[in-house]
Image (tube, grey):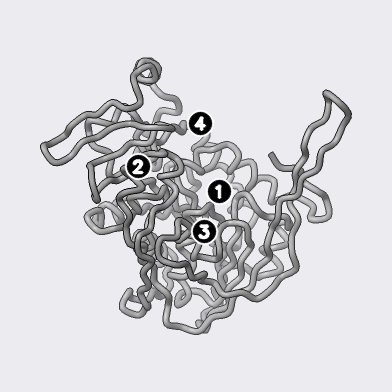
Amino acid sequence: MTAAKTTYRPMKWMLCILLSFVSLSISVPTSSAQEVRRVRNGIILVDTGRNVRAIEPFKGNYDNGTAYAAIVNKYKRTFPDVNVYCMVIPNAVAFYCPDTAKTWTEAEQPAIRHILSQLSADVKAVDILDTLQTHVEEPIYSRTDHHWAPLGAYYAARRFAEVAAVPFADLSEYEPRVIHDYVGSMFTFSRDKAVKNAPEDFVYYVPRTDFSASRITYRKMSQRVGRKRKRRTISWLTASEPEPFTFFRDYEDGSSAAYCTFMGGDTNTTSVVTHFQNGRRLLILKDSYGNALPSNLFSSFEEIHVVDCRYFLQNMVDFVKDHAITDILFANNLIHASAAKTTQAYERYLTQNPATRHEIQ
């Protein structure tokens, strides 16, 4: 596969179809100390015992990636005086998939480079593939969760700060905190006991600097409509009034929700005012991977606003104007960047009317 292609080769798709008939519990030993097997939902398990790593395969396509790049370019045209950046975040499969399991996933690195190659010249690409590869022996991705680890987000944020030409605080200026015995989402996805029996430490970093945070919280509402056989459920979002909150949420050892320590999760629009004064105000457009980025930038921007690709009811043009945004960072993991719904949401945000009730799936 090359970055120039926009579809996958037919023979590769035929191979994927054939593999779907193979038992999901196939084990492929790669060495005397490591084995690889595929389990529920196509999750790839690497190694055994306390070293088990659960990896989510990538099944996206280049056409959706092209559309994602196009919406990033559209934001630059819509906001010509704003710096626009695109960081496509690799999933763990980009770095930790053994050669023996490569046929169970599409390759991520060429897909990311394809998206970045489609950006207009005035959009600034933030290529973090080499950055993360340099630190691949460190715990930059969780073994038991589908997210990257806070340390990986730190290195990615540092690369972004370099591209954006803003200061960046060394890791020594943070307070490390640990949640022990963490088993994240991959046990739920795989239902494999090997994941449950391989807990890890969730280590995150709290900046030693003054800041204040506020949020708008979204809630999903549902209602049954129609009669008899035509009855269906419709759902929509409601938004709270802005309220102050603590950016970091504390979790007990053993909590499977440890990654939600950042902003309490996805269902918020978050605004942070820092002590730093440089006239730069950053808007991060993200999925859950992006939750771990903002706190690394509290010494880089005087304001940081965080909008999720699934939860936002305001008009983006008004939002950027009202908050005098100077920089916009798209920070989506490759799976989300390759999903049509992500691009559709960012497109809708540009024109949506906050007074209109928008149904959601």
Residue 216 in view (yes/no): yes
**Disc 2 marks which amino acid?**
Lys
Q: Nearer the viewer, residue 28 or 345?
A: 28
Other residues around mark 1 within 10 Å, as few (<14) / some (14–19) / many (≥20): many
Q: Please state, as top left, top right, bottom left or bottom right, where the N terminus lies in the image.
A: top left
Instruction: Residue at the far right: name it.
Output: 227
Residue type at the position of mark 3: Leu
Residues 293 and 302: in front is 293
The residue to which callout 3 is attached is: 329
Q: Is residue 237 left or right of residue 213?
A: right
Q: Which residue is mark 2?
A: 193
- Count residues near mark 4 (Cα–Cα under 10 Å), then give few for <14, some for 14-19, many for 20+: some
Quarter of the view holding residue 110: top left
Looking at the rendered structure, the secondary structure element under dot 2 is helix
Q: Is residue 207 above or below residue 345?
A: below
Indicate the position of residue 46 as horizontal and vertical percent values: 26, 40
> Which sits in the foreground, 81 or 96?
96
Disc 4, SS: helix
- Answer with left or right where residue 2 lies relative to residue 303: left
* Residue at position x 56%, y 70% in the image: 304
